[in-house]
Image (tube, rainbow, N blue to C red):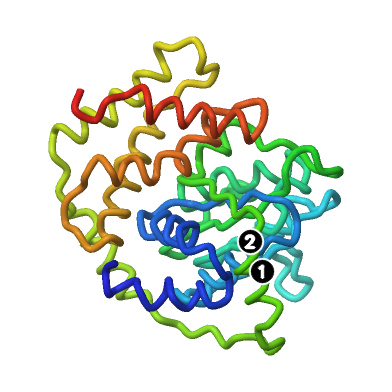
């Protein structure tokens, strides 16, 4: 593992026991400049992972608890009339942070969910005819409960596609859960291990990771399979193609290499593709991504 990210992986692993693969995927997503969706049942550590990522990068962040009565202005901000100078002044909302932790995003109404769309896509928001640039780097780390849970609203396809990755945590193993029970009840102090300048340097290194034509052709065959096979009702978009490439380069960097292997594509494919393939259930989405991995030959 790359020594630049190993301490951060180990720190989060001490908080979220037994989930090192999901931790690496989450770091891969953020270092590739993408937004992260963490989906699972309540109580398995979604918010813990999100908080640990924000603290580890040492970036300014806000945690927003999404609720059914939340309004777009609660997220973006609001213009308030100033009696002294008889002008409206804009009060920024929590979206104006480098890391926005959107907890239980699918409990908010579609109107409030859509307020995130421009921010995630363009790094800016438009309010009352004015455009405001968001701080950089800008990450959205959102958590959501499965749709079968009460009080949830399905995220639209356009917004799901803005998330570079979706990670599911699942229940811990017996050993991990026992270690959690035996662990001290005191909250572990999370340290900033990567600052803004270091993150920028890492992103520049990731951009320089080499990708052979054979690997690019492999990615294109994967995407093409979803567009030509009727089993895939929601084919992968060109944005998904770019996401596969960006995530593969980031994963190769985490593994300590400056070149991408087909195994890197395979490692990140489920996290990048399953929420875009939009199976009728999580199990079906996993089955679709497994079919992709088995039906497309890396060697052509």
The residue carrying pointer 1 sits among few (fewer than 14), some (14 to 19) or many (20 or more) residues within 10 Å by Cα, namely some
Q: Is residue 300 visible?
A: yes
Q: Position of residue 67 (x, y in %)?
A: 81, 54
Mark 2 or mark 1: which comes first in sequence?
A: 2
Mark 2 vs 1: CB contact within 8 A? yes
Q: Residue 9's quadrant in the figure?
A: bottom left
**At 35% across and 54% down in the image, what residue appears?**
32
Question: So how many labels did they put on this image?
Answer: 2
Cα–Cα span, label 2 and label 1: 6 Å
Task: Please tell me whether residue 257 is drawn above or below residue 68 in the rendered image.
Answer: below
Q: Secondary structure at mark 1?
A: helix
| 8 shown above or below 267 | below
Q: Which residue is mark 2?
A: 172
How far across and how far down the image is residue 252, in percent? 26, 54
Q: Residue 177 has which mark?
A: 1
Residue 79 in sight: no
Judging depth in this view, the residue of 249 and 93 nearest the camera is: 249
Vertical relation: 151 (above or below) 19: above
> Residue 193: image x %, image y %?
40, 81
**Residue at point 21% right, 33% down?**
216
Q: Position of residue 137 (x, y in %)?
A: 41, 63
Q: Residue furthest front?
A: 175
Horizontal side of 160 relative to 204 (left or right) equals: right
154 or 121, which lies in front?
Answer: 154
């Amino acid at each position: 593992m790359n020594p630049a990210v190993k301490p951060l992986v180990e720190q989060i692993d001490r908080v979220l026991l037994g989930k090192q693969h999901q931790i690496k995927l989450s770091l891969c997503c953020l270092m590739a400049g993408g937004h992260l969706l963490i989906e699972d049942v309540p109580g398995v550590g979604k918010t813990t992972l999100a908080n640990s990522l924000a603290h580890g990068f040492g970036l300014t962040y806000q945690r927003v608890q999404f609720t059914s009565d939340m309004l777009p202005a609660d997220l973006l901000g609001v213009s308030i009339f100033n009696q002294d100078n008889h002008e409206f002044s804009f009060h920024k909302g929590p979206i104006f942070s480098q890391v926005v932790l959107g907890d239980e995003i699918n409990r908010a109404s579609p109107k409030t969910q859509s307020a995130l769309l421009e921010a995630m896509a363009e790094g800016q928001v438009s309010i009352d005819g004015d455009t405001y640039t968001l701080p950089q780097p800008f990450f959205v780390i959102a958590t959501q409960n499965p749709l079968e849970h009460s009080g949830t609203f399905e995220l639209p396809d356009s917004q799901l596609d803005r998330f570079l990755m979706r990670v599911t945590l699942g229940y811990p193993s017996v050993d991990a859960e026992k270690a959690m029970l035996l662990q001290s009840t005191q909250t572990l102090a999370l340290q900033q291990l990567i600052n803004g300048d270091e993150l920028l340097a890492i992103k520049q290194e990731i951009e320089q990771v080499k990708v052979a034509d054979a690997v690019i052709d492999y990615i294109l065959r994967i995407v093409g399979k979803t567009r030509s096979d009727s089993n895939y009702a929601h084919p992968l978009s060109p944005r998904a193609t770019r996401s596969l490439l960006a995530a593969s380069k980031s994963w190769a960097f985490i593994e300590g290499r400056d070149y991408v292997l087909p195994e890197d594509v395979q490692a990140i494919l489920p996290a990048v593709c399953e929420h875009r393939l939009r199976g009728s259930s999580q199990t079906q989405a996993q089955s679709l991504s497994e079919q992709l991995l088995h039906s497309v030959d890396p060697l052509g």
